[in-house]
Image (tube, helix red, strand yellow):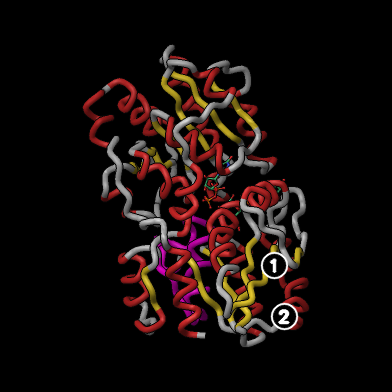
Amino acid sequence: MKKVMLVFGTRPEAIKMCPLVNELKTRKNIETIVCVTGQHRQMLDQVLTTFNVIPDYDLSIMKQGQTLFDITTGILGGIKDVLEKVKPDVCLVHGDTSTTFVTALACFYLQIPIGHVEAGLRTYDIYSPYPEEFNRQAVGIISKFNFAPTELAKQHLLDEGKNPDSIYVTGNTVIDAMRYTVVENYSHPELDWVGDDRMIFVTAHRRENLGQPMHNMFRAIRRVLEEHPDVKAIYPIHMNPVVRKAAEEELGGCDRIHIIEPIEVFDCHNFEARCHLCLTDSGGIQEECPSYGKPVLVMRDTTERPEGVDAGTLKLVGTDEETIYEWFTKLLDDKSEYEKMAHAANPYGDGYACERIADILERNL
Ligand code: UD1
Ligand code: UDP
């Protein structure tokens, strides 16, 4: 019996790792152990409940307004004992958060092999996204198994000199999650509020966008909403107090945007599938919306998901107020521009990434 331990801590990691936890639990040669860092609390717990995953260990490190130092020292201080107690044959981490990087570092110190899920995404600018680009590159140096979602991600790892035998193209596990979430008969009071108007789905949270860039985004969104009487926006807001303050300052009192608490992933995917278009700086949403054929204006200067840009459904618009205003207006007013982006594309996998990862681990451990 081989021990596979999965460590994650934020909402998106949980959405992408819980389907893998549940797949690994069906394998009789594998003992699956889950440790959450609790880098997020409510937003993490919401996902654990949805996927019925009960962690074996919970480091509970979250603090309001935490800094990168708080997260790093909190995890390093707590995870050593768990790793030494469990002694996993492999520890799986996901993507690019501080939970991911710090767990990988702790495993390296204890010489525990790492499996990196969602390996090989790159912008090659360590300040954008910040600190995620550094985190994923750093994990790439020490990981034994690299589960790349796409051929492009694999190519990045090859270009960096990784052993080709350590790289497996599996697809992204978020597409696995989406096989169960989007349903035909779906209703929600917020969708009733939108009625026959066009629904815009908004999210924003990136650390490098906190401050002026986020104010720019919100101002542009407000201006466009106020100029289009048949458009309404739903914005499930991140719990970061800095994001909440900026949203209140720029969007408060605008009756055409509903700012609501974080929604369950089931609701989120169904909202995405029904929106007219999406404005976001999220990574995961850039992977999800293309498969519903929903145009996404990516409010960032770089993206590590160029596959969606190449497929035509993502447009990188940066964080300048006028540019976001112009593109948002164009997609609402110019049908042909909208149609150019509004087609289904799924460059991120076929929904069977978890099975592949579990097979690879069974064969190689
Ligand atoms: C983190 C990740 C980012 C990922 C994002 C997903 C890092 C450095 N950043 O950023 O890569 O895209 O998660 O959402 O790893 N908060 C709560 N409750 C929660 C979650 C957050 O109150 O359930 C508040 C807390 O005040 C917390 C703050 O949000 O201090 C920021 O959380 P943090 O994990 O530091 O950063 P994120 O922006 O969420
Ligand atoms: N999501 C969710 N509820 C919300 C907002 C987002 O379940 O209120 C989901 C979304 O479908 C995607 C993931 O959270 O799977 C993206 O998380 P986030 O944007 O926080 O992080 P990122 O992907 O940028 O790291």
Amino acid at circle 1: Cys
Which residue position is annotated with label 1? 35
Where on the picture, by quarter, is residue 34?
bottom right
Foreground residue, 280 or 4? 4
The crowding category of the residue bearing disc 1, from other C-alpha atoms within 10 Å (few below 14, some 14 to 19, many at least 20), is some
Q: Farthest residue in the bottom direction?
A: 111
Seen at 49% across and 82% down, the residue is: 144
Membership of 207 in magenta stretch: no
Foreground residue, 253 or 238? 238
Seen at 43% across and 69% down, the residue is: 356
- Counting residues from the start of the chain, the first of labels 2 and 1 encountered is 1
Foreground residue, 38 or 28? 28
- Label total for image: 2
Q: Which mark is residue 268?
A: none
Region rendered in magenta: 119-148
Seen at 49% across and 36% down, the residue is: 270
Camera sees residue 206: yes
Mark 1 within 8 Å of ligand 1, using the beta carbon: no
Residue 39 place in picture, x, y as percent? 69, 57
Secondary element type, mark 2 = helix
Q: Which mark is residue 86?
A: 2
